[in-house]
Image (cartoon, rainbow, N blue to C red):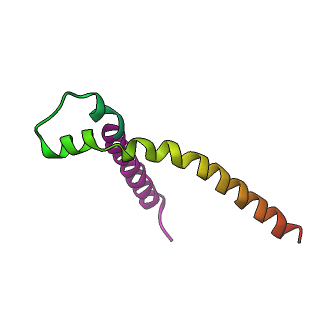
Amino acid sequence: MATYDERKVWGWLFVSIGFVCFVVYFFSAIISKVLPPSNIAVISAMQNDWYYCFLVPLTLPIIVVLVYFHWLSMKMFKHA
């Protein structure tokens, strides 16, 4: 069984990883598009890439539909 301190460290680790991923995505999808053209290969690739700008907004409706179907299947299983 994990102690309270160990669980607290794991929790902060997961929150930190999620925050870093969010910041990288936000920079890649939004900030890099408004910066002036760059000679740095990585930033230039992010500026010319439009896939990640549309990834999250187009994934959200699908997640809503999948959550509804999950709820519906659990209701059918519960009352079967």
Which of these two is toward me, 4 or 15? 15
Q: Which of 13 and 67 is in front in this view?
A: 67
- 24 and 54: which is toward the camera: 54
Tell me where the magenta segment starts and ends, as one range: 1-28
Identify which residue is drawn at 60% across, 52% down. Answer: 63
Tell which residue pokes out farthest to the right in this image: 79
Kindly report the secondary structure that dominates the magenta region of the rendered protein: helix
Q: Does the magenta stretch include residue 8?
A: yes
**Residue at coordinates 35% horizontally, 39% vertically from top-left?**
29
Quadrant where the C terminus is found in the figure = bottom right
36 versus 45 height, above or below: above
Q: Count the marks: how many?
A: 0
Residue 12 place in picture, x, y as percent: 40, 51
- In the rendered image, which quarter is residue 46 located in? top left
In the picture provided, is 65 more to the left or to the right than 51?
A: right
Residue 10 spot, x, y in % from top left: 41, 58
The answer to whether 67 appears left or right of 73 in the picture is left
When asked about the image quadrant of residue 19, the answer is: top left
The residue under the point 12% across, 41% down is 40
Identify the image quadrant of residue 23: top left
Which residue is rendered at x = 30% and y = 44% of the image? 49
Can you say whether 58 is above or below 2 in the image? above
Q: Where is residue 16 in the image (x, y as percent from the top left)?
A: 37, 48
Farthest residue to the left: give it.
39
Image location of residue 6, percent across then percent down: 42, 61
**Magenta stretch holds residue 18:** yes
